[in-house]
Amino acid sequence: MKKEEYKDNSFGVAGVILGILSIIFVGSPFAGIAVGILAIIFSIKQKKHHANKWSKAAKILGIIGIILSIIVFAAGAYYISTNPDLLSQFKSGYSAP
């Protein structure tokens, strides 16, 4: 009688959850990038253990989260650099009209 191999998907599921969180945390680019990197690491661990759809989905979601976070960071930096009045408001503080 042949033993069935138990295929654990825990790294893949964790990677998918982290990938979804990286997309949710796009508004905070550094958190989005960090969580996206963790999703890719978990995806690689799952692929080494047992390659399946969970590992592929985690890698795709992690990459999407990282790319979106970089785009949001670049857009924010561009917006702040092109609006000197906005930067001076941060330096002087908020004053009610």
Image: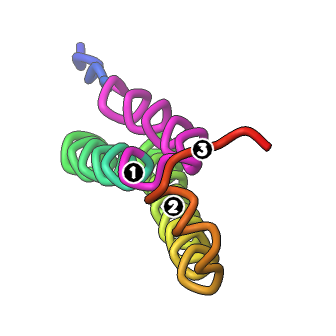
Q: Which residues are magenta?
A: 9-31
Say above or below: 64 vs 27.
Answer: below
| Residue ID at (33%, 48%) | 43
Which residue occupies the foreground of this view, 22 or 97? Answer: 97
Q: Position of residue 71 (x, y in %)?
A: 57, 72
Q: Marks 3 and 2, Cα distance to the nearest angstrom?
A: 28 Å
Q: For marks 2 and 1, give the one nearer the viewer.
A: 2
Whichever of callouts 2 and 1 sits on the residue coming sooner in the sequence is 1
Q: In the displayed structure, does residue 28 sit left or right of residue 83?
A: left
The crowd level at tag 2 (other Cα within 10 Å; few <14, some 14-19, many 20+) is many
Q: Can you tell which mark lies on residue 36? A: 1
Q: In this figure, which residue is indicated by the disc labeled 3? A: 94
Pointer 3 local density, CA inside 10 Å: few below 14, some 14–19, many at least 20:
few
In the rendered structure, find residue 89 and report the number of the disc placed on it: none
* Residue at which label 2 appears: 69
Q: Is residue 25 rendered magenta in the image?
A: yes
Q: Report the front residue among 91 and 21.
A: 91
* In front of the other: 77 or 55: 77
Q: Nearer the viewer, residue 77 or 86?
A: 86
Q: Element under label 3? A: loop
* Viewer-nearest of discs 3 and 2: 3
Check if residue 50 falls in the magenta segment. no
Identity of the residue furthest to the right in this view: 97
Q: Is residue 50 above or below residue 78?
A: above
* Label 2 element class: helix
Instruction: Name the residue furthest bottom.
Output: 82
Q: What is the distance, in whole Å, between disc 2 and disc 1 at their CAs?
A: 9 Å
Compared across the picture, whether 86 is left or right of 90 comes to: right
Q: Quadrant of residue 14?
A: top left
Q: Quadrant of residue 18?
A: top left
Q: Earlier in the sequence, mark 1 or mark 3?
A: 1
